[in-house]
Image (cartoon, rainbow, N blue to C red):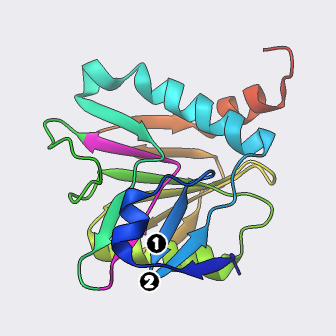
Amino acid sequence: MATSTSVPVEQYLRTTYHPDMEYVDGELVERHVGEHKHSRLQTLIGGTLFLREAERRFRALTEQRLRVSGKEHKYRIPDVCVMALPYRSEPVLTTPPHLAIEILSPDDETADILAKVADYLRFGIPHIWIVNPYKGTVQEADREGIRNCPDLVVETELVGRMDFRELFARLEDPTE
């Protein structure tokens, strides 16, 4: 399980953490980030989405803090999220994005990822992609459950089709 520390929500919201931390039920929760494959895949996904923004009328955001719950003070930070246009720009998003993308790290535990997915679903995020650059897998999560994507292709009506075979191939090429 991720390391956690108790702090008041007001302190969490006024503090900059390196790396950034999530806030769940009064606890700071460590995010596993910073490894090369995680970082590189986040860049590739963000770049791919950036090229589609104007045509498909959305904005891609990396590491954007979301307030996924009001009373319990839960703040999650997906690796990448997509907001349909127009949306209200705010320091911490209180409107669910169209898509949240979680890129797994070797230290991520299944229970922690499932808790995060459950928070995203309760918040109202209709599409969640869970990408594992270390195993070369992609899963989709929504209200129907979590499904493996054996062809590594995922799609939403707003974002369009994303072929992770191409992204994983670029991830492995150190000359690019």
Instruction: Examine the rendered structure and indicate whether residue 31 appears above or below residue 23.
Output: above
Q: Farthest residue toward the top?
A: 175
Horizontal and vertical percent position of residue 173: 84, 23
State the CA–CA distance, disc 1 to disc 2: 7 Å
Quadrant of image for the N terminus: bottom right
| Tag 2: amino acid | Gly
Q: Residues within 10 Å of mark 2 (few under 14, many from 20)?
A: some
- Magenta stretch, residue numbers: 72-83
Instruction: Examine the rendered structure and indicate whether residue 103 appears above or below residue 72.
Output: above
Helix, strand or loop for disc 2: loop
Horizontal and vertical percent position of residue 49: 44, 29
Residue at figure coordinates x 31%, y 65% from the top left: 67
Question: Is label 1 in contact with label 2 (beta carbons under 8 Å)?
Answer: yes
Q: Nearer the viewer, residue 143 or 173?
A: 173
Instruction: Examine the rendered structure and indicate whether residue 54 appears above or below residue 46.
Output: above
Residue at which label 1 appears: 23
85 relative position to 93: left or right: left
Q: Nearer the viewer, residue 30 or 16?
A: 16
Residue at which label 2 appears: 26
Q: Residue 77: say if magenta.
A: yes
Residue at figure coordinates x 85%, y 14% from the top left: 175
Residue at figure coordinates x 49%, y 52% from the top left: 16
